[in-house]
Amino acid sequence: MRLIVRGGEVVSATEVLRADVLVEDERIVAVAAPDSELTRTFAASADRVVEARNRYVIPGGVDVHTHMEMPFGGTFSADTFETGTRAAIHGGTTTIVDFAIQPRGGSLHQGLEAWMAKAEGHCAGDYGFHCIVSDVTDASLAEMDRLVEEGVTSFKLFMAYPGVFYSTDGEILRAMQRAATTGALIQMHAENGIAIDQLVGQALARGELAPRFHGSTRPAILEGEATQRAIQLARVAGAPLYIVHLSAAEALAAVADARDRGQPVFAETCPQYLFLSEEDLAREGFEGAKFVCSPPLRSDQHRSALWRGLLTDDLQVVATDHCPFCFKDQKERGRDDFSRIPNGLPGVEHRVDLLHQAVVEGRIPLTRWVEVAATAPARMFGLFPRKGTLSPGSDADLVVYDPHRVQTLSASTHHMAVDYSCYEGMSVTGGVEWALVRGKVVLEEGRYVGRPGDGRFVPRGLSRAVA
Ligand code: URP
Ligand code: ZN
Ligand code: ZN
């Protein structure tokens, strides 16, 4: 099978050039000058030509933080691997890395097998897994070593959610020490959950029950404190550290300080922390429940700091933390008590478009769009150069992007299995036209033409960011 994507502006993390992309079977064979001899020879035996004039051609997006079918707060996140990865394709994300959860008292492999079974044969794009370590024991530490060999090279620990996923500082230190011996990457949910639980209890006792109190009981200072503590633990252990879903200026300052000292500390933020704010959480009535996630949405001062962090590379990755719960029946569980609202927002479909909107608004350069949405996450999580770049030998995961299309984001048109949109009515410029997963066209002029099972499990190597 030979396919050419012809005449587009090929955007990478470093440059923009007009070129033809030549694809054979599952791989890219060349990025050639337009109408070059190489293209003409290849075209003579091509099965398909995709015209990309006046379009960007970019590597498929890599979203390294999703939760499909995740049990949380007494329910399950609403997207299955089938619906969630199909929505991702509509939005230009061709690879996700989801989180397999170690059951308390069980093994990491038990968690991984359960998540593999949910995903296998259902995904529209490729997928990998991180493991959530909810029980740090001698046995689970030993399993971490084996998992690295099996292509699961990153492990999330929680300083939040006591009694659910929470680990003590001692447990975290032990996991970091183990990761230091194999080169695995520890991902940290950095919020001081012990203090937060006290604040939540006090708020409820005062009768503060509305969604906005989810925000006031999870102050930025406690995200900053936990981030700083995680950084010091990683320093003692000699392990690299990746902070997930960073939302607060205090946390970003801690990451920047560590990086300035030369410590291998990395961080992601998410579109919701860049585009939404605590004002959304404080919307009238119970509307704010649509915006309950942890860490919570913050003020403009924090948002400005995050935009700056993306430019200075103190934030390297933008991932979604896609964890959708329907407003009806799921978010509504917390109508009389904000602490019962399942935490998480839908977003896997809109990350690439929202970041392109940031380009349109002059917040980030065009090459940085591709870097934070595809190249850097692929490097960070051992998928590069297979994913995240359009280079000879890379998987032909590719998006043809129309930079001029205007779309209005809405639950009535999105493809995620959730009954509301955090961005309802927002107009963005740009949209995905074509998407290829390992050379197979799965989105054709905006129409999904793939099948569940097109996506395969991708074993990952060690982080390239750390090396
Ligand atoms: O609110 C969130 N972030 N839900 C998903 C679970 C997590 O902590 O990432
Ligand atoms: Zn988290
Ligand atoms: Zn998450």
Image (cartoon, rainbow, N blue to C red):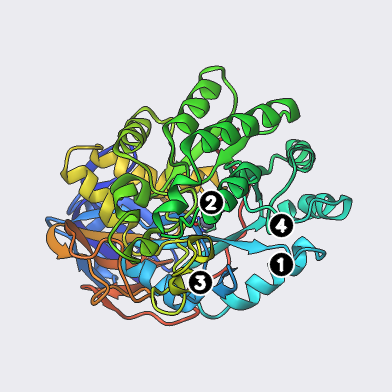
Asked where in the image residue 35 lies, by quadrant, the reply is bottom left
Left or right of 63 in this view: 11: left
Q: Residues within 10 Å of mark 3 (few under 14, many from 20)?
A: many
Provide residue 216's location: percent of width, then percent of height.
Answer: 45, 45
Provide residue 405's location: percent of width, then percent of height.
Answer: 12, 61
Question: Mark 4 and mark 3: span between their CA atoms?
Answer: 20 Å
Determine which residue is flagged by label 3: 77
Determine which residue is flagged by label 2: 383
Question: Which of pointers 4 and 1 lies earlier in the amino acid sequence?
Answer: 1
Question: Mark 4 and mark 2: span between their CA atoms?
Answer: 33 Å
Determine which residue is flagged by label 4: 163
Discs 3/2, front: 3
- Residue at point 42%, 62% (across, down): 345
Asked where in the image residue 429 lies, by quadrant, the reply is bottom left
- Find out whether the residues at labels 4 and 2 contact each other: C-beta distance under 8 Å: no
Question: Which of pointers 1 and 2 lies earlier in the amino acid sequence?
Answer: 1
Determine which residue is flagged by label 1: 111
Numbered circles on residues, count: 4
Q: Amino acid at mark 1?
A: Gly
- Residue at point 78%, 36% (across, down): 177
| Quadrant location of the N terminus in the rendered image | bottom left
